[in-house]
Amino acid sequence: MLRFALRGRKGLGAHKSRPLLGGLMLPAILAAGISLAAAGSKIEQPIEFPHDVHAGKMGINCMYCHTYARRSAVSGLPPLQKCIGCHEHIDSVKDKPRIKKLFEYWEAKRPIPWKKIHSLPDFVRFDHERHIQRFYFQQGQPVQEVCAHCHGDVKTMTVAEKVTPLTMGWCVSCHEQDHPENAVSAKTANGPNDCSYCHK
């Protein structure tokens, strides 16, 4: 059974450990009808964005497009202006159907209605900034590897798809592992194991 240490939480006292899923909690979650895209499910997008070309062949840093990942809880999507800023100067691909569609949105002054793939329930808080700052900026791991841990090897995908379950147990299994605190130290640390870090 999954357990979290509840240390010094206001109103709860200092408990050594408490079962996280027990009693009526799991049936209540199931009864709530939470429906999220399963790993391996394909979601059709308005434009087939080729991650394999941009992140793979061209080696563009994930954070060039997903600029909020390093400073926010969410990674963000690039504004259409960023796409056009490059593609208005690349004549060799302007006749491709997806690029024509890109310019149609631009000329109509409409944002591309991308569909979210990596959804979490509203009661879960995942912080991109905390993970990017630690594993990319502090430890110097390649950004595509850091992002791939949760999002899969996106540089090999055309349309991004969900390949990891992103369930609580999956996240907890990572938090239970020893991770180096920085690139030069042999010291390691686990991720936080207090419920309040992810459930606010």
Image (tube, rainbow, N blue to C red):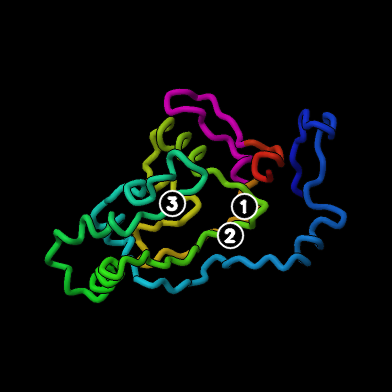
Q: Is residue 21 above or below residue 88?
A: above
Q: Magenta stretch: dominant SS?
A: loop
Residue 13 in which image quadrant:
top right
Q: Which residue is mark 1?
A: 170
Residue segment shown in magenta: 173-191
Q: Position of residue 133 (x, y in %)?
A: 45, 35
The residue lying toward the viewer, choosing from 6 and 169, is 6
Secondary structure at numbered mark 3? loop
Residue farthest along the front direction in this orientation? 109
The amino acid sitting under disc 3 is Gly
Labelled pair 1, 2 in contact (Cβ < 8 Å) = yes
Specify the label residue 165 is tagged with.
2
The amino acid sitting under disc 2 is Pro
Specify the label residue 140 is tagged with.
none
Specify the label residue 76 is tagged with.
3
Q: Is residue 72 above or below residue 184?
A: below
Secondary structure at numbered mark 2? loop
Q: Position of residue 50 (x, y in %)?
A: 31, 65
Answer with left or right where residue 186 lies relative to residue 27.
Answer: left
Residue 143 in which image quadrant:
top left
Q: Is residue 184 above or below residue 47?
A: above
